[in-house]
Each structure stands twice: as C-alpha cells, then as structure tokens.
Image (cartoon, rainbow, N blue to C red):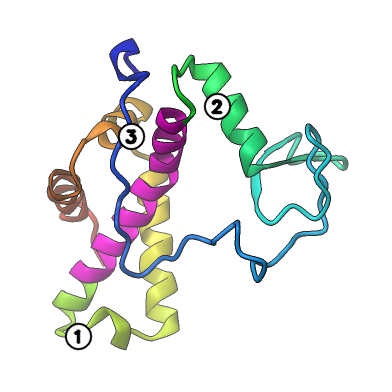
Amino acid sequence: MAKSYKNTILPEIKLKYFKRPDLKSPNCPRTNFTCAKCEMKNIPFIGSMDDAYSSNPKYFCEDCAIDAYMATYGFISREAAVSWRRRIFDVGYFLNETLLECYAKEKNMAVNDLSEEEWWKVCNLGNNFYNKVPKRKKEWLEAVPTQKELEENLQKLCRKIKF
C-alpha cells in the first residue's frame, strides 16, 4: 500500500446480502475467548489470531487488531486504518455478492430465491477464486475508491468464473 494512502479514509462498501455484526450492541453474540492484548473477556468478535493452527492460539478483539494493523502499516489516523482494514474483508464479501447476482441472473432467478446449497456453492467458488488472486491485485481492488468502480472491476473478475 502506497504511503500516500495512509491518511485516506475509504468509504464503506454497502453490502446487500452479508451483514456486519454490531459489536456495540448488547445483543451481539459473545465468544468464550479473552483478548490476548487487552484481556477483554468474552470478546464479541475475533479481530485476529496468532498461532491459529497451534494448540494454544491467541485471540485478539477487533480494537486490538485494528491497533496492530495501524502500527504495522503506519497509518496516520485510526479512522483510515479502520477503513482500509475493513476493505480487506469487504472486497471479498462484495465479490461473492456480485458473483451471487451473476449466478442468479444466469439462472433467471433472484438472489434471495437461491437455495442454501446454491448460495454456499457460489460463495465457495468465489472464495476459492479470490484466494488465487495475486496480492498486488487484491491491494489494488481494496484501494478502488468508489463502490461503483469496484463493482465494475469485480464484474470483470466474475466473467472469469464458470459455474
């Protein structure tokens, strides 16, 4: 990521089918995990993990994960770090939403009419495809400033995926 982006706050991607958890809500489900940094108990959402495949993984709350991301990449403001970190996840979700719409259109259906099996099949296809996208291309997609431009680029990627 270029240094000039360090203070840029990216607009949030509006998702249609995937919902973000409201971490501030008292109704937000809690985990049984404690943050390895701030020691918050029953963190509502795992922000990141260290040693994920070991017998003793370390869990971090969203706030501590953002602080680490901000320090690692040298962001000037927390708001900018939050917006860029959110993009890492949301571009993948948005790709899946775009792919679901392409699949539904091909089947002459609405996305909400797809079966759960079709939904998971398409999302797994999207995830497997996106995992193979080179890191530089992902970083470029994450930096696309507008949702409309991002959608156009993701639609081009979707044309490469066969159902």
Q: Spatial distance from mark 3 to mark 2, Cα to Cα?
A: 17 Å
Residue 33 is situated, as x and y percent measured from the top left of the image, at: 81, 52
**Disc 1, disc 3: CB below 8 Å?**
no
Give the labeled residue for mark 2. 69
Identity of the residue drawn at 32% across and 14% down? 2
The quarter of the picture where residue 51 lies is top right
Give the labeled residue for mark 1. 109
Above or below: residue 70 compared with residue 48: above
Which quarter shows the N terminus? top left
Specify the segment rendered in magenta: 79-102
Query: For the residue carrying disc 2, how many other residues have a C-alpha within 10 Å: few (<14), some (14-19), or many (20+)?
Result: some
Residue 66 is situated, as x and y percent measured from the top left of the image, at: 57, 33
Give the labeled residue for mark 3. 138
Residue 99 is situated, as x and y percent measured from the top left of the image, at: 26, 62
The quarter of the picture where residue 47 lies is top right
Query: For the residue carrying disc 1, how many other residues have a C-alpha within 10 Å: few (<14), some (14-19), or many (20+)?
Result: few
Q: Earlier in the sequence, mark 1 or mark 3?
A: 1
Identity of the residue drawn at 42% across and 39% down? 88
Above or below: residue 57 compared with residue 147: above
Q: Earlier in the sequence, mark 3 or mark 2?
A: 2
Identity of the residue drawn at 73% across and 62% down? 30
Q: Spatial distance from mark 2 to mark 1, Cα to Cα?
A: 40 Å
Which quarter shows the C terminus? bottom left
User: Relative to residue 85, is residue 30 drawn left or right?
Assistant: right
